[in-house]
């Protein structure tokens, strides 16, 4: 069954939008898109043949023979620019490398959906410095918390706290977002409580806690 994470990503894509799923692996996102009624062009790319052939097998089993597959490092071997480009379940360094290598293609897409496994704040910082605007964001919990960004090529001025916590997430302050940061705050309180007053990590951890209280929980 498709994960909540991939379903959430799929639900950010309209049925009439063409899609490239970079790092498609099993191809579950493409299958979900077809199942929910997307009739546009779907291109699935992966840098490894193994995942790609598993994807092809899954498409055949699901009865979707119109999903294209391309062996490609990022977008390097994919010439078409679709309305939407998805990069999910990858490290932020990989996403940055892929976007840097095909800058012109990413600039032409209507929206780029990014879900990195860690360092979402660093991803936002890079996007902000490289003139991508965050037009939507969502956070979900599926065993752990996942933040999903929707971006487009445009200059956007973000403050430090918007980069850290997400401009849309901070604006909306959803239940899941507040739960995520309440948990982080409780964890920080526990760690700080276990440290001596002179411990070198104390000021940095205290700052992290103060910032969460100030920007998210207040
Ligand atoms: C952890 S899987 C994520 C699969 C799926 N996108 C998801 O979110 O469930 C990462 C996939 O990205 C592929 N990958 C890693 N680097 C890549 C690159 N530079 N270009 C294309 N695919 C890449 C890997 O081969 C792997 O299949």
Image (cartoon, rainbow, N blue to C red):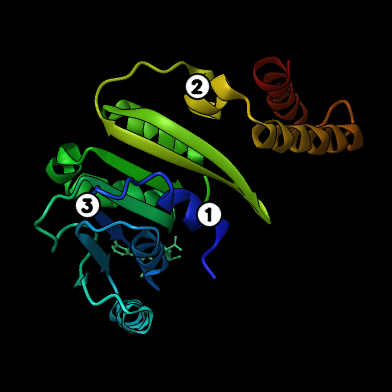
Q: Position of residue 110 (x, y in %)?
A: 22, 37
The residue to which callout 2 is attached is 162
Circle 2/circle 1 CB separation < 8 Å: no
The residue to which callout 1 is attached is 5
Q: Residues within 10 Å of mark 1 (few under 14, many from 20)?
A: many
- Residue occupying image coordinates x 33% and y 51%: 86
Task: Identify the image quadrant of residue 45.
Answer: bottom left
Q: Position of residue 203 (x, y in %)?
A: 74, 24
Q: In which quarter of the image is the C terminus?
A: top right
Q: Is ligand 1 less than 8 Å from the beta carbon at label 1?
A: yes
Q: How crowded is mark 2: few (under 14 residues within 10 Å), some or many (20 or more)?
A: some
Task: Find the distance from the CA under tag 3 to the CA under tag 2.
Answer: 30 Å
> Which numbered disc, 2 or 1, marks the residue closer to the eye?
1
The residue to which callout 3 is attached is 18
Work out whether residue 121 can be spotted. no
Q: Where is residue 42 in the image (x, y as percent from the top left)?
A: 23, 61
Could you tell which of marks 3 and 1 lies nearer the N-terminus? Answer: 1
């Amino acid at each position: 069954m498709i994960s909540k994470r991939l379903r959430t990503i799929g639900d950010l894509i309209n049925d009439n939008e063409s899609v490239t799923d970079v790092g498609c692996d099993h191809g579950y996102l493409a299958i979900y898109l077809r199942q929910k009624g997307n009739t546009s062009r779907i291109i699935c790319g992966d840098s490894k043949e193994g995942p790609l052939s598993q994807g092809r097998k899954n498409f055949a089993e699901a009865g979707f023979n119109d999903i294209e597959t391309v062996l490609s490092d990022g977008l390097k071997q994919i010439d078409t620019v679709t309305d939407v480009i998805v990069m999910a379940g990858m490290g932020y360094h990989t996403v940055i490398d892929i976007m840097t290598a095909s800058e012109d293609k990413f600039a032409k897409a209507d929206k780029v959906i990014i879900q990195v496994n860690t360092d979402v704040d660093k991803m936002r910082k890079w996007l902000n410095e490289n003139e991508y605007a965050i037009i939507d964001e969502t956070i979900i919990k599926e065993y752990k918390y996942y933040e999903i960004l929707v971006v487009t090529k445009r200059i956007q001025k973000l403050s430090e706290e918007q980069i850290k916590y997400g401009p849309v997430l901070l604006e909306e302050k959803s239940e899941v977002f507040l739960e995520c940061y309440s948990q982080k705050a409780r964890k920080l309180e526990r760690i700080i409580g276990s440290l001596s007053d002179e411990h070198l990590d104390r000021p940095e951890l205290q700052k992290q806690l103060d910032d969460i209280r100030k920007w998210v929980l207040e």
